[in-house]
Amino acid sequence: MSANQANKEPHIIVNDLTMAYGSFVVQRDLTFTVNREDVFIIMGGSGCGKSSLMRHMVGLKSPAKGQVFYEDVNFWEAEVEQRDQIMKNIGILYQSGALWSSMTLAENIALPLNEYTDLSPSQIREIASFKLSLVGLTGFEDYYPSEISGGMRKRAGLARAMALDPDILFFDEPSAGLDPISASLLDELILELRESLGATIIVVTHELASIFAIGNNSVYLDANKKTMTAAGDPKKLLAETEDPELRRFLTRGKS
Amino acid sequence: METTAEDMTKACELSFSRPASDTLLVRLKGSWTIGHKLPSGAEVQNQIESDPTIQRVTFDAGELSGWDSGLLSFLTNIINQCSAKNITVSQEGLSEGIRKLLHLAFAVPERKGARKEAVRDSLLNRIGASAIDVGQASIDTLSFIGDTFLAFLKFLVGKARFQRSDLMITIQQCGVQALPIVSLISLLVGLIFAFIGAVQLMMFGAQIFVADLVAIAMTRVMGAVMVGVIMAGRTGAAFAAQIGTMQVNEEIDALQTLGISPMEFLVLPRMLALILMMPLLCIYADLMGILGGFIVGVSMLDISSIQYINQTIKAMNLYHFFIGIVHAIVFGVLVALAGCLRGIQCGRSASAVGQATTSAVVTGIVAIVIATAIITVACNILGI
């Protein structure tokens, strides 16, 4: 932990971000830094704009105000090529998996590889099988997303997110809809990926068990105040926070 | 079974008494469940309003034989009314279960601004808002057409990224698989034309010109229009539903975040498939329409088959044929645009997919009719 602390290098910086749909403001004045190899948690109650924040960070929705920096590149003001370059370096696991339903699992994972690499079809197929085996889906290459369970779809979505070995992985509610054992296995997998790939990981969740098990940095979005009220290691936040809302959130409303 | 029958007979009853001058006692009797006809809170309200000296409301639920949400919503209503008038409500007469649930219902205060208020805008406001919406919608449509055009240019220089297999499947769906319905409709349209023409032309003994009528009408415009309408209902709707469902399922987000343009990946193959298949279907529809006219001419108008075919060949020229093909290509572009545009614009719910599908068909057919009118006038001015 101390070694990690020592060489903290900012990877993503969100500066004074305001998110709005039309005139309806979801969150305002968000400023925080995600460091390299963090497992960064975006937490908050339901409907506070966690997923919206993720959509702003990955380039799906432009902010009403403020900037998102990837290292020193201002994402929303960068050239299209530069933006594509950044997005290629991001893997995203969507809430429902978001696998392309007209393609098999292997084809889903092969698509980004086809687009961005010069590998031969057989090599791509091997990589797709390997990624599927990483998430425990060996032998499911030729299944369609509609033929497997929700949990398996999620894992297949993770395999696709990892297809291009990205530096940054986003997880949108990874444990939603999973049984406790699968959820904790997924948590272990996330930590494993951080260790072995050296990836920066951002998790959108409100699952307390996951937050404390994997997170080493976080931001808390308050739905009523419509802004962030805390940032930092969630374990420290639990020990030190004075904010009654955050305390209630981190203790399941017990205090 | 007997107990339920007995329960049914014990309908709930509401009565009032005044144990003290400032107190209203509400007596609840019988089985107070949503299966029964329940008294309304207005009765209590009448009691309270009829006497302004009432400062306290108490309950007696001693003879209550059963209750569920029906009673709770009734009580909530009373409590809300009383708190608005600063009247104390004493819940002591109620059983513990009821008190606990009521406590739960009032535990979280109403979030400010959470309740949706039915705001009635003035007429002027609404007209203004719809005008702004129309403006925004036209900008969206134009930018979609622009994006599609850019994707098409990229395709022409060979840089567009989409899956060949996707193109092939779409070609199959909107080509071969549309043949049966196109056959049926265009054959019948040919028959109908021949019938209507025959009635008029027979009066002059000129029924041989039925062949001209059918051949020119089908090849010049009707073949293409019928195929266009069929494809708007069949394929345009399918495009909107497919792309709309992908939107709901975040699949389009997944494409975008991988840097793959949905324009190239989804819209382009569908557009190409329709542009390729519509002219072919149109030629086929022309033939089927002429066959329909031929059946009527030979079987009912005493024209010999050789005569009918010769007359048709004499009436036809390449101008008619090519104008028909131009129609078909334009309709192909319009139907694909309408289907894909509505799919991409689709919201994130199941009902939004339904709306997108309906809207794709309507947009497609309206666009076809307008385009037909424009091409017809243009041909007229050009004299072809």
Image: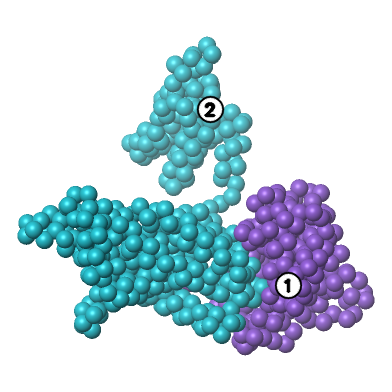
Up-down relation of residue B32 to residue B342 (above or below): above
Q: Residues within 10 Å of mark 2 (few under 14, many from 20)?
A: some
- Disc 2 versus disc 1: distance between alpha carbons? 63 Å
Chain painted purple? A
Label 2 is found on which chain of the structure?
A: B
Could you say which quadrant of the image residue A32 lies in?
A: bottom right
Q: Residue furthest top?
A: B2
Task: Kindly tell me whether residue A198 is visible in this rendering.
Answer: yes
Image coords of residue B261 (percent x, y): 58, 75
According to the colouring, which chain is cyan? B
Marks 2 and 1 share the same chain: no
Q: Which residue corresponds to the image point at 22% horizontal and 77% vertical from the top-left?
A: B377
Per the image, label 2 sits on a secondary structure element best described as: strand
* Amino acid found under the numbered disc labelled 1: Leu
Query: What residue appears at the point 77 percent right and 65 percent down from the top-left corner?
Result: A125
Residue drawn at the location 67% of the way across and 86% of the way down? A82
Q: Which residue is mark 2?
A: B67
Residue picked out by circle 1: A113
Left or right placement of residue B214 versus residue B368 in this view: left
The quarter holding residue B355 reads bottom left
Q: Quadrant of the N terminus of chain A?
A: bottom right
Q: How far across and down, in percent of the image, does residue A164 sit?
A: 76, 73
Residue furthest to the right: A3
Left or right for B349, reference A125: left
Label 1's element?
helix
Q: x, y percentage for residue A134?
A: 83, 61
Which chain's residue wears label 1?
A
